[in-house]
Image (cartoon, grey):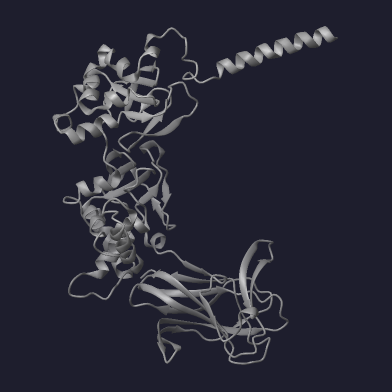
Amino acid sequence: MNILKFKYKRLFASVLTLAMVSCSNPWDDRTDNGDANLTVTLSEAITNTTEVSQFAQLLVETGYDKILADSKTYTVFVPTNAAMAAVGNDILDNPETLKKFVENHIALTAYSSERSDEETQIKMYSSKFLIFKGNNTIDDASIVNPDNYAKNGVFHIINKALAPKLNIWQYINSVAETNQAATYLQSLKGFSIYKSDSLAKIVSEENGAGYLADSLTNSYLRNVYNLNNENNLYTLFLMEDAGYTAEVDKMKPYLIKKTNTERDSTAIYAQYFTLRDMAFHGKYELDELPANLVSRFGVVVPVDKTQIVETIHLSNGIVYIMKRVEVELDKRLLTKQIEGEDNDGFFNFVRSRMFYRDREDLSGLSFQDVMVQNTGAVQPWLSYSGKDFYSTKYQVKWRAVNDIQTNVFQQRVIIYGKSEVIDGATTFTEQLAIFPYTNVERNFYEEVLIGEFTLDEARDIDFISLVGANTTANGTNSITLDYLKFIPVIK
């Protein structure tokens, strides 16, 4: 029995050793494998490889032969001489673009072609990212001779040069003179969609970030996605002028702004609210595009591949030039929901009388709400605010759960557009809507329609107030709210 155990242990050790060897990294196994390149640096190994002599010469011209001779570990994707023949003089004859070109073939650390990852995003010395796909593809080039090891790294010979691509924002700037949507996106460097954008741009300029280097400097980059960011991948639908104009015109009746003599504010905002739903996080290749994509603002955008005119691969994602991306208004104009527990302030009672609650409805679903009780004061108030209301009619509903009192009480919603401080007291002005007192029935968990109101101008609303009864009697001056819904009506 002991002999059997001893033999079993030896067999297990042998199998384990074999498994460890078979699963090891080729970079770690390079020592003493008989490859003469392991005694020389990457710079020397590439220079000694005849089929890549042209790229080797570029390493010397740019000084990267010295960098690839130092003690750090590198990966170099080296184009063949045949691949180099396709590189234009606009790159080769300009020292700055030539340097970026060479840098776009070099990465820090060693990346073997023998790996388990389907995709790896590799940062190149150019600060661009390239996707290493499978075992034999880097960006849109194929590896024809992989895993040539040297003492300070590895080089792969590829069949196509890796000229640095523009990123999405750089591409937008390059076509701004010929594409209206791109022209508008570029213009948001100078125009601020929100007040906070202006402050961000000041901070950015003070810190020296530059107008194209930082997401603070453009209202689209700041509020939608920073399409100038090389660290993430994005997909952008960029419409041709006719389709773009048609979509913007659909939005204009819902984004009416007071127009001054200097600019058409309605057009500016209609364009923004059209284009904000055209960018998506992640790179969707043509065969990966689903029937619908959801923007970061919750808008469901149908993807009609028959509208695609051109597909443009860029360093941080992909741009689809579209004839039109048609989004129905009932998908664009989303219901705005304001949660009861997200109040901005309160009036006419002390904080200890306000309770943020974790509850369950009759079906067992959890929700949070707020309840104010026993204030001993008339008309206790909770105040809320909301951004980006459209110029249209709204239906207003609430869910307000009265589940701990034995009596019915009443509350109302009043909407003010502005406030001002007079003699130290806050006075609300520009009354937009005042709804009648409505019963909050006991143990009623359904939504209740409390009324409608119309906004003639698209705007933010700073003071949406939930107001209790005009009585000091505790139990009858309570207020409670799970949420308010503002449902836009299509004209």
Say whether residue 366 is left or right of residue 108: right
Quadrant where the C terminus sits is bottom left
Tell me where residue 165 sits by quadrant: top left
Residue in the image at 80% along x and 11% along y: 5
Residue in the image at 20% along x and 47% along y: 175
Tell me where residue 95 sits by quadrant: top left
Say whether residue 291 is left or right of residue 8: left
Residue nearest the observer in this picture, 422 or 239: 422
Residue nearest the observer in this picture, 414 or 164: 164
Say whether residue 95 is left or right of residue 227: left
Quadrant where the N terminus sits is top right
Residue nearest the observer in this picture, 431 or 447: 431
Residue 181: tell me if it is visible: yes
Residue nearest the observer in this picture, 315 or 249: 315
Residue 250: tell me if it is visible: no
* Residue 26 % position (x, y): 48, 18
Q: How many marks?
A: 0
Give the answer, above or below, for where 345 lies relative to 167. Answer: below
Give the answer, above or below, for where 382 lies relative to 265. Answer: below
Give the answer, above or below, for where 226 lies relative to 195. Answer: above
Residue in the image at 32% along x and 34% along y: 125
Give the answer, above or below, for where 96 lies relative to 194. Answer: above
* Residue 351 % position (x, y): 61, 79
Residue in the image at 31% along x and 60% along y: 219
* Residue 183 % position (x, y): 21, 55
* Residue 419 % position (x, y): 41, 84
